[in-house]
Image (cartoon, rainbow, N blue to C red):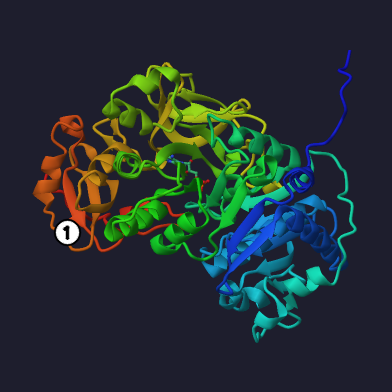
Amino acid sequence: MLGLMQQHPLLISSLLVHAERHHGAQEIVSRRVEGDIHRTSYRELAARSRRLAKALAVLGVGMSDRVATLAWNGYRHMELYYAVSGSGAVLHTLNPRLHPDQVVYIADHAEDKVLCFDLTFLPLVEAVASRLKTVKHFVAMTDRAHMPASKIAGLLCYDELVDAQDDRYDWPQFDENQASSLCYTSGTTGNPKGVLYSHRSSVLHAYGAALPDALNCSSRDVILPVVPMFHVNAWSLPYVGCMTGAKLVFPGAGLDGKSLYELFESEKVTVSAGVPTVWQGLLAYVDGAGLTFSTMKRTVIGGSACPPAMTRAFQDKYGVHVLHAWGMTEMSPLGTVCSFRTKHLALPPEERLALQAKQGQAIFGVDMKIVGADGKELPWDGKASGELLVRGPWIVEQYFKGEGGDPLQDGWFPTGDVATIDPDGYMQITDRAKDVIKSGGEWIGSIDLENVAMAHPAVAMAACIAAKHPKWDERPLLVVMKKPGAELTREALLAFFDGKVAKWWIPDDVVFVDAIPLGATGKMQKNKLREQFKDHVLPTA
Ligand code: AMP
């Protein structure tokens, strides 16, 4: 016997329809690349998205056609999120920080038909335009007054396209399993692979993301997504915004500490989200200028491990609660968030901080397990570590165009991360499988060592990599970037590890560098460091 409830497909357009009807006056604020602060509302956003959907149809964009963006977080990008997916086409968010050759590879692979870009990225688009095989229209995301002189023939003006249409448009209804958007993995080895989200997976993920034990978003919140809309749909915050009716604040290109801080304060931001490297810049600015946060309540930190020193600074110094989160492009991206249970509220501060080094508990919709080298499930005792596998309705089943074959193992997606899970179900990533340091047959997790180093007041950033060792195969080598003007010796830093980790985990050597290479999504590129230090001779060798 089937249930007797209404059948409404879970479509991305339904989020916008909801926001317009129920939170129409709520504000959306954007710092524009044109240099000003722009204000709009969900009502206006919905109307412009309908106009844009009509404009895309005029350009010949049909069902499942790919429309690419090279853009910062802003209201026009948000309009594209809704107009493209809502009309049945597929939004392909390109990462502008990638090498131009990679942009060409990805746009060709995706067979993008239209490319919309912020003015910042005009030089990049001009450099690749003639090599893009499938792109028929290039659209500069600006108004007529700011249209640049360009070598691109027939360059279109975004605002003109929108203004040429009226907003009488009904969002088409179709199967919720239709593709909605496409995002490529960062691909440190081999070519990037496309993850093709569906309307259903995106809406379910937004429900999960907004939950109290996840990002905990409501209509009372003012959300500033620092995480880019070109990196896994800004962790779904543009969808969560419409779903909850929260005020959204988009930082555009202003991702430095000062620009972010000013926006946090002037727009009374309560929630933010981003990778640790961005927060480092913000904390350095706020520290240096002796400022405080007057409205910020919490920030979600993920994409790389959040060092406890950062959690401590946010919480103890500024009263901003940290939610450590873990996920990946293949997971839309959210998997776990480290929120507290009732029993944790009474823990001494140091124990709570230790708990927050974990990536946390699974959100409903994500199941996880850890397995040993033999593929057998390992116990949840907080000690056994193995590869982390996940499954659920917003987790990838296959990559776009079947690239790389069937990624699943018995219906589970292997994440490539190594983790422990404690008896309460709190997961902790110890490493990427390929970054684990294998010392005399035992594994050393580099994240633990980096967390210790990052707690030293003179350290700005630390990466721990495996260096060759004649006896132990591999031993930890710590690569450190000091804070500007800070004094620190190798010996002092190694002594700092005493008592904080097992003796045999203490790195064998420290090298100081001017900068640690970061990838297009702000992660430390350890493959580059391993290459750079492949001939490093450890003093213990
Ligand atoms: P991406 O698909 O680019 O978002 O990268 C996903 C990968 O980033 C994961 O598989 C992890 O290796 C890493 N990652 C994400 N969040 C965290 C976190 N909180 N702690 C440690 N690693 C993380």
On the image, the x and y values in percent for residue 265 come to: 46, 55
On the image, the x and y values in percent for residue 369 come to: 50, 23
Residue drawn where x is 72% and y is 73% of the image: 138
Does residue 72 sit above or below 364 in this rendering?
below
Q: Can the viewer see residue 193?
A: no
Distance from mark 1 CB to nearest ligand 1 atom below 8 Å: no
Count the labels in the image. Answer: 1
Does residue 432 sit above or below 6 in this rendering?
below
Q: Nearer the viewer, residue 220 or 188?
A: 220
Quadrant location of residue 29?
bottom right
Q: Which residue is mark 1?
A: 486
Residue drawn where x is 57% and y is 71% of the image: 36
Give amino acid for label 1: Ala
Q: Residue 201 vs residue 124: left or right?
A: right
Q: Can the viewer see residue 37?
A: yes
Q: Which residue is farthest top?
A: 1
Quadrant location of residue 34?
bottom right
Q: Quadrant of the N terminus?
A: top right
Q: Nearer the viewer, residue 462 or 22?
A: 22
Q: Nearer the viewer, residue 14 or 173?
A: 14
Quadrant location of residue 318?
top left
Q: Nearer the viewer, residue 11 or 453?
A: 11
Residue drawn where x is 35% and y is 20% of the image: 346
Q: Residue 412 vs residue 514: left or right?
A: right
On the image, the x and y values in percent for residue 64 come to: 80, 53
Q: Quadrant of the C terminus?
A: top left
Quick one: SS at disc 1? loop
Disc 1 crowd rating (10 Å Cα; few below 14, some 14-19, many 20+) is: few
On the image, the x and y values in percent for residue 457 come to: 20, 49
Q: Residue 98 vs residue 353: left or right?
A: right
